[in-house]
C-alpha cells in the first residue's frame, strides 16, 4: 500500500517540483525576459559590464537565470546563466534563428552556412505604428538576438502565411491574428523555389489550428471512436438484459462521459473556428468534467466488480442495486464537479501564479499540456485512479487464479457444481481482462507520454499508444458489443418488440364477458 501511495503522487510531485524550480530566479530581473540576451559566450570587461552588438550592458543590468522562455512564453528549466538587458536602449530587438551568415534548414532542424557565392539578406520591410512601411537595414535599426522558440519551426512564407514585422520588433501573423514577441518567432534567410537569392522569412511554432500530423490523426481517431461509442450506449440502454444489471448501468455512464470528452476534443481540433473566450471556457471545462467523470466511473466499475467478487452474500435485489447506483452517481458527479470547481478557481484566481494555472481558455480550449502544472489538475488525479484500478485488476486476477486451482481439485461427484462455478469464474476473468486492456493500459501509456513529452523520440515512440487510446471506442464496441451473449440479447429484444402476440381487443373482452353473462342467466 505504501508503494502504491508513493507512485500515485509521483506525477503530481513532478509537476509541482517543475513549477517550483521554474520560479526560482536567483535575482529579480529589472527588464522582461524578452528584452534580455544570453551572455554565456560574451567576455565581460573588468568592471563587470558587457558589450553586445555595440550596446553596452552595465553590470547592474546583468542577472542570473535558471530558466528560459520558449514559444508562447512557456518557462523551461535550464542551467543557471547570465542574461543582460539589451533591448530598448534605444534600439528594439528582433530575433534571428541563426547567427549572421547562417540559415535555418527545416529538413535537418539545424543552422547551416549560406554558400559563399550567395547573398546574405539584411533588409526587410518594417511597419510603423502609423502603418507606414519602410525597407530598413535590420542590423542598423534593431539589436539582433539569436535563438529558436522551439525545435519544430515552420517557415511563414508569404505565399500562404501573411505576416508583418513591426517597428517595435514584434511579428504580426495575419492568418491567426496573433502578435508574437521575440520569444515566439525568429527570422532566417530563405530561398524560394526557382530563386537565386535569399530573402528574410519569419519562422514560428505551430499555433492555434495548425496541428501536427499525430494530433490530427488522433483527433480523427477520437471522432471515429464517438461513432462507435454512440451505438454501444444505445444498445446497452435499449436492450433490457444489458441495462438490467448494475454493471451495465455503470458501463453506460462511463461511455457517456467518454463520448462527451472525445466529442469536444474532436470539435476543437477539427473545427477551424476560433472560439471566443466564453464558449472556449465552456468547452474546455465541460471537456475536463467529462474526462474526470469517465475516470471516476471506471474506478467505480472496478470497485463494484471487486465488491461482488469479494462478498458473494451481497444483496442483489433491485432496490439494493438502485441504492448503490445512486451512491455511485453522487460520488462520481460530485467529485467531478468539485475537481472542476477547483480547476476553474485556479484558472481565474489572482492568488494562483501563472505557472500553476491549468491554462484552459488562454490560448487553447483545453488544458495547456505544455505546462507541468497539468499534472496537478489532470494527470495526477488520473494516476491515482488508474493505480487503484490496476491494483483492483491484479487482486481480482490473483483471486480468480486461486479459485480456479481450488475448483479444479473438486471430486467427480461435484462435477456439476465445478462446471457451473468455472463458467462464472471464467466470465468474470474475461470481463476484468477486457477492462484492463481497454481502459487501463491505454490510459497509463497516455500519462507516460505526457511525462516524456519534452523528448522528441517519445513522439514517435508513443504515436501508436496514443492512437490506441484515441480509437478506444472501436475497441470497446468490439469487446462489449460483438459478443455472442450480447448479440443474442439484441436479437431477443428485437423479436420481443416486433413479434409480440397481439393483445385481445376491447371488443373481444366484451364478447367474452357477454357469453359468461348469458350462460349465467340460462343457468339461473
Image: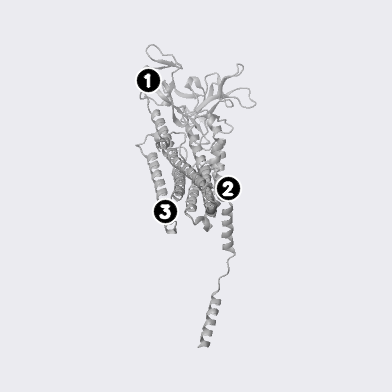
- From the image, state whether disc 2 or disc 1 is nearer to you: 2
Which residue is under mark 3?
A: 324
Colouring used for the render: one colour
The disc placed on residue 415 is: none
- The picture places residue 384, in percent across and down from the top left corner, at 43, 40
Visible in this render: residue 47?
yes
Which of disc 3 and disc 1 is earlier in sequence? 1
* Mark 3 neighbour class, 10 Å CA radius: few under 14, some 14 to 19, many 20 or more: some
Which of disc 3 and disc 2 is earlier in sequence? 3
Which of disc 1 and disc 2 is earlier in sequence? 1
Visible in this render: residue 142?
no
Which residue is under mark 1?
A: 61
Q: Nearer the viewer, residue 65 or 446?
A: 446
The disc placed on residue 478 is: 2
- The picture places residue 428, in percent across and down from the top left corner, at 51, 49
> What's the distance in space between the residues labelled 2 and 1, CA to CA?
64 Å
Amino acid at each position: 500500500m505504501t508503494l502504491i501511495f508513493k507512485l500515485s503522487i509521483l506525477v503530481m510531485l513532478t509537476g509541482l517540483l517543475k513549477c517550483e524550480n521554474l520560479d526560482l530566479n536567483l535575482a529579480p530581473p529589472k527588464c522582461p525576459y524578452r528584452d534580455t540576451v544570453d551572455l554565456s559566450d560574451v567576455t565581460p570587461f573588468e568592471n563587470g559590464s558587457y558589450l553586445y552588438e555595440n550596446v553596452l550592458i552595465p553590470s547592474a543590468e546583468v542577472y542570473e537565470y535558471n530558466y528560459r522562455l520558449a514559444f508562447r512564453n512557456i518557462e523551461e528549466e535550464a542551467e543557471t546563466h547570465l542574461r543582460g538587458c539589451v533591448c530598448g536602449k534605444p534600439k528594439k530587438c528582433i530575433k534571428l534563428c541563426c547567427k549572421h551568415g547562417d540559415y535555418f534548414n527545416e529538413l535537418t532542424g539545424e543552422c547551416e552556412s549560406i554558400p559563399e557565392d550567395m547573398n546574405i539578406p539584411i533588409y526587410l520591410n518594417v511597419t510603423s505604428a502609423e502603418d507606414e512601411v519602410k525597407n530598413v537595414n535590420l542590423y542598423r535599426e534593431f539589436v539582433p538576438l539569436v535563438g529558436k522558440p522551439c525545435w519544430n519551426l515552420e517557415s511563414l512564407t508569404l505565399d500562404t502565411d501573411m505576416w508583418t514585422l513591426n517597428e517595435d520588433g514584434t511579428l504580426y501573423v495575419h492568418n491567426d491574428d496573433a502578435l508574437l514577441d521575440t520569444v515566439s518567432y525568429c527570422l532566417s534567410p530563405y530561398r524560394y523555389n526557382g530563386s537565386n537569392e535569399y530573402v528574410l522569412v519569419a519562422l514560428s511554432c505551430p499555433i492555434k489550428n495548425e496541428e501536427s500530423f499525430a494530433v490530427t490523426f488522433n483527433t480523427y481517431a477520437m471522432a471515429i471512436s464517438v461513432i462507435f461509442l454512440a451505438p454501444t450506449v444505445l444498445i446497452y440502454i435499449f436492450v433490457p438484459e444489458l441495462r438490467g444489471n448494475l454493471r451495465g448501468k455503470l458501463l453506460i455512464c462511463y461511455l457517456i462521459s467518454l463520448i462527451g470528452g472525445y466529442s469536444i476534443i474532436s470539435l476543437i481540433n477539427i473545427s477551424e473556428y476560433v472560439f471566443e473566450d466564453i464558449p472556449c471556457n465552456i468547452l474546455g471545462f465541460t471537456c475536463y468534467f467529462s474526462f474526470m467523470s469517465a475516470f471516476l466511473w471506471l474506478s467505480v466499475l472496478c470497485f463494484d466488480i471487486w465488491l461482488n467478487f469479494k462478498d458473494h452474500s451481497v444483496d442483489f435485489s433491485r432496490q439494493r442495486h438502485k441504492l448503490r447506483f445512486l451512491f455511485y452517481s453522487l460520488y462520481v458527479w460530485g467529485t467531478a464537479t468539485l475537481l472542476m470547481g477547483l480547476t476553474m478557481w485556479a484558472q481565474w484566481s489572482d492568488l494562483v501564479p501563472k505557472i500553476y494555472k491549468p491554462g484552459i481558455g488562454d490560448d487553447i480550449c483545453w488544458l495547456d499540456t505544455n505546462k507541468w502544472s497539468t499534472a496537478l489538475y489532470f494527470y495526477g488525479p488520473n494516476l491515482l485512479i488508474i493505480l487503484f484500478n490496476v491494483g483492483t485488476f491484479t487482486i481480482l486476477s490473483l483471486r480468480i487464479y486461486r479459485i480456479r486451482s481450488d475448483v479444479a481439485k473438486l471430486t467427480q461427484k461435484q462435477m456439476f457444481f465445478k462446471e457451473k462455478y468455472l463458467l462464472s469464474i471464467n466470465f468474470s476473468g474475461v470481463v476484468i481482462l477486457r477492462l484492463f486492456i481497454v481502459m487501463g493500459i491505454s490510459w497509463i501509456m497516455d500519462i507516460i507520454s505526457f511525462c516524456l513529452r519534452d523528448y522528441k523520440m517519445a513522439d514517435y515512440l508513443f504515436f501508436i499508444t496514443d492512437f490506441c487510446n484515441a480509437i478506444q471506442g472501436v475497441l470497446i464496441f468490439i469487446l462489449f458489443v460483438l459478443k455472442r451473449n450480447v448479440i443474442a440479447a439484441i436479437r431477443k429484444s428485437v423479436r420481443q418488440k416486433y413479434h409480440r402476440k397481439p393483445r385481445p381487443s376491447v371488443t373481444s373482452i366484451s364478447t367474452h364477458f357477454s357469453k359468461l353473462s348469458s350462460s349465467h342467466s340460462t343457468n339461473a
